[in-house]
Image: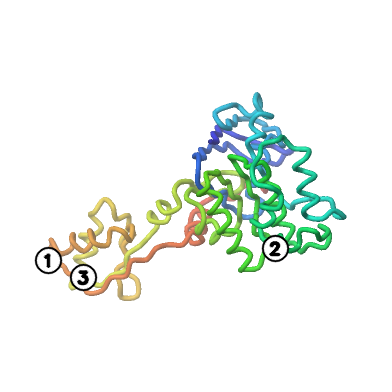
Amino acid sequence: MIEIEGLRKQFGSVTAVSDLSLRIPRGGVFGLLGPNGSGKTTTIGLMLGLIRPSAGSIRLFGQDVSAAHQQALRRIGAMVESPAFYPDLSGRANLRFFQGIGPSRGGKSVNELLELVGLAARANSKFRTYSLGMKQRLGIAYALLGDPELVFLDEPTNGLDPSGMAEVRELIERLAKAGHTIVLSSHLMNEVEQVCQDVAILSRGQIIAQGKVQDLLQLQGTVRLKTTADERAAQILGALDWVSAVRSEGGYLIASASPDRAGDLTRALAQQDVYVTEMVPQRVSLEKFFLQVTAQQPDAAATRQ
């Protein structure tokens, strides 16, 4: 769906995006994860053609975005940063206005979209009376006008309470199941972990890790165990090519290996007459993984989002 090679964006002396290469597959939810200032919004702006890159290439739907910008935009919906609407028009009137000036692509009606994002009861209220969360919901409805194939959502749960955040996550999952490709930008690691199948982690304008969410987390998992001979167990486990490290901690052995391989670990020890007396597989959270990989990055000049 999206192919990016060597993308770079300079704002004067500031590098907002540096040597970024990325593949976003068709279907599902792809997460752009990073703190404020990591380059997420700039990257989305570059993909949408709102910002001109300093170097590199972007292909959407197999075509270079610079050569087929208008054709690509007809297949895209987006909510970038804070949604802006006419303050004295109602939510329904705003959507009808933008529906009228946009390309005719069919899709759900305005009323259906308002129902979908939970704004049907306030559809006739003026936009300026909406809470921040309601404004975010209307922005999502706007992004869905015309039933786009590709949808960019930049911090879509900003301003929502926990219940509203859960509803938006459910909505994103439904959109993906309906065949949309969703690119979700967020600094909320729990949000990305719950709804995204693939993720790219950005820091200081660079991608520092990317892949399937579960694959990234499994690579960082550990197994905590006690055995009948811990010193011998440490030697055995340390010789396995799928165990990256073994250490002693608080009376336990900690083996750096995917929790899914706990059975293989037990079998390898038993074959050497060492038996497990206690075992607890420990999966790392996306938040912990993010902190681990960002801690490995050298300091760089300040960037902007």
Residues under numbered marks 1 and 3 in contact, where contact means CB atoms less than 8 Å apart:
no
Residues under numbered marks 1 and 2 in contact, where contact means CB atoms less than 8 Å apart:
no
Q: Which residue is mark 3?
A: 276
Q: Please identify, in this view, whether the residue under mark 3 or under mark 2 is nearer the observer.
A: 2
Q: Nearer the viewer, residue 36 or 297?
A: 36
**Which residue is located at x 67 percent, y 59 percent?**
158
Q: Position of residue 2 (x, y in %)?
A: 55, 36
Q: Which structural element holds mark 2?
A: loop
Q: Position of residue 88 (x, y in %)?
A: 87, 55
**Which residue is located at x 18 percent, y 63 percent?**
269
Q: Is 101 situated left or right of 70 in this image?
A: right
Which of the marked residues, 1 or 2, is nearer the chain's N terminus?
A: 2
On screen, residue 160 above or below 52: below
Task: Report the Cα–Cα distance between label 3 and label 2.
Answer: 48 Å
Q: Position of residue 166 (x, y in %)?
A: 58, 64
Residue 80 in view, yes or no:
no
Q: Bin the neighbour count of mark 1 within 10 Å (Cα to Cα): few under 14, some 14-19, many 20 and up.
A: few
Q: Which residue is mark 1?
A: 273
Amino acid at dot 2:
Gly
**Which residue is located at x 55 percent, y 32 percent?**
5
Q: How many marks?
A: 3
Task: Report the Cα–Cα distance between label 1 and label 2.
Answer: 57 Å
Task: Report the Cα–Cα distance between label 1 and label 3.
Answer: 10 Å
Amino acid at dot 3:
Val
Amino acid at dot 1:
Asp
Which of the marked residues, 3 or 2, is nearer the chain's N terminus?
A: 2
Q: Quadrant of residue 221?
A: bottom left
Q: Bin the neighbour count of mark 2 within 10 Å (Cα to Cα): few under 14, some 14-19, many 20 and up.
A: some
**What number is the disc on residue 159?**
2
